[in-house]
Amino acid sequence: MNGSSALWTREELTGDVREISFSFQLNGESVPGLLILPREVDSAEKLPLVLIQHPGMSSKDDYFVRDVAISWAKRGWACAGIDAPLHGDRDTHDPMALFRNRDRYPEIAARFATEISATIDHLASSFAIDTSRLGYVGYSLGSMLGVPAVATDGRFRAAAFCLVGEGGLVGSVSEPESPVRTMTGVAVRVVGKLGDELISRGATEALYAAFPGTKDIVWLPGGHYEIGPDVIKAAGDWLRDRL
């Protein structure tokens, strides 16, 4: 955790779960996050950790992360998400910045990858988390950032990347140095939408084809902005069978 400060936490009990807000400083910027744990856990038991990453214009506190994390924590998982750079409670809140300046893609993707690894390290050092059972779920921007982050970290067992394709923050999967090609040990599910207005089917299929390990692809009806129970179930089912 080079350049990272200690973890700050604030905890509340919400029904059957523990809801923990956290933050840490990394390379001069605060990284805010949310962790949901089962309320009752065997003191000798370590939990799998699932990182859930929000879509663009969203945050860790929205339904896509918080409500899903509460539901999945009841399965016996620790679930967490952070505010992506320029989103949520970040020091600089400017979600549209990436659309205005695509030259920042490599910088933002590299920053997020570093933050995800630091998040895992911080949570594992403070809570009973099994780092051999790591999962990742991303929606849209959360997947675009998540693909290189999961590849860079190297510890994830399974990932579900929803509403994403090659290009943009993911980069070209045809390049020999593409991080996608290093993900031999990660079981990957790609979830696409048949009516996606932003990500073409060809781009999604190209990304899927580049993943080298265990994988499958699921196509669901609807458009890019229709992230509902169908997408969440497709992602959760994939992780449930692999963590």
Image: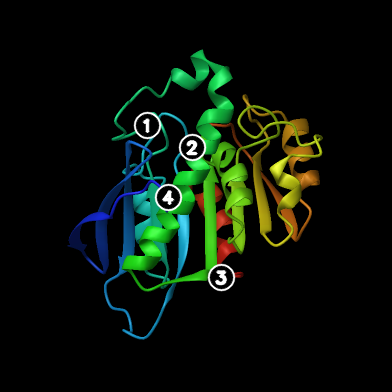
Q: Percent position (x, y) of residue 145? A: 55, 38
> Residue, x 39% and y 28% (percent of image)?
86
Q: Earlier in the sequence, mark 4 or mark 1?
A: 4
Residue behind mark 1: 87
Q: Are marks 4 and 2 in contact (CB under 8 Å)?
A: no
Q: Are marks 1 and 2 in contact (CB under 8 Å)?
A: no
Residue behind mark 4: 2
Q: Select label 4 or label 2 by which is in front.
A: 4
> Residue, x 73% and y 55% (percent of image)?
216
Q: Quadrant of the C terminus?
A: bottom right
Residue behind mark 3: 243
Q: Earlier in the sequence, mark 4 or mark 2?
A: 4
Residue behind mark 2: 111
Q: Secondary structure at mark 1?
A: loop
Q: Select label 1 or label 2 by which is in front.
A: 2
* Distance from the alpha carbon under mark 3 to that under mark 2: 27 Å
Q: Earlier in the sequence, mark 3 or mark 4?
A: 4
Q: Percent position (x, y) of residue 154? A: 61, 57
Amino acid carrying label 4: it is Asn
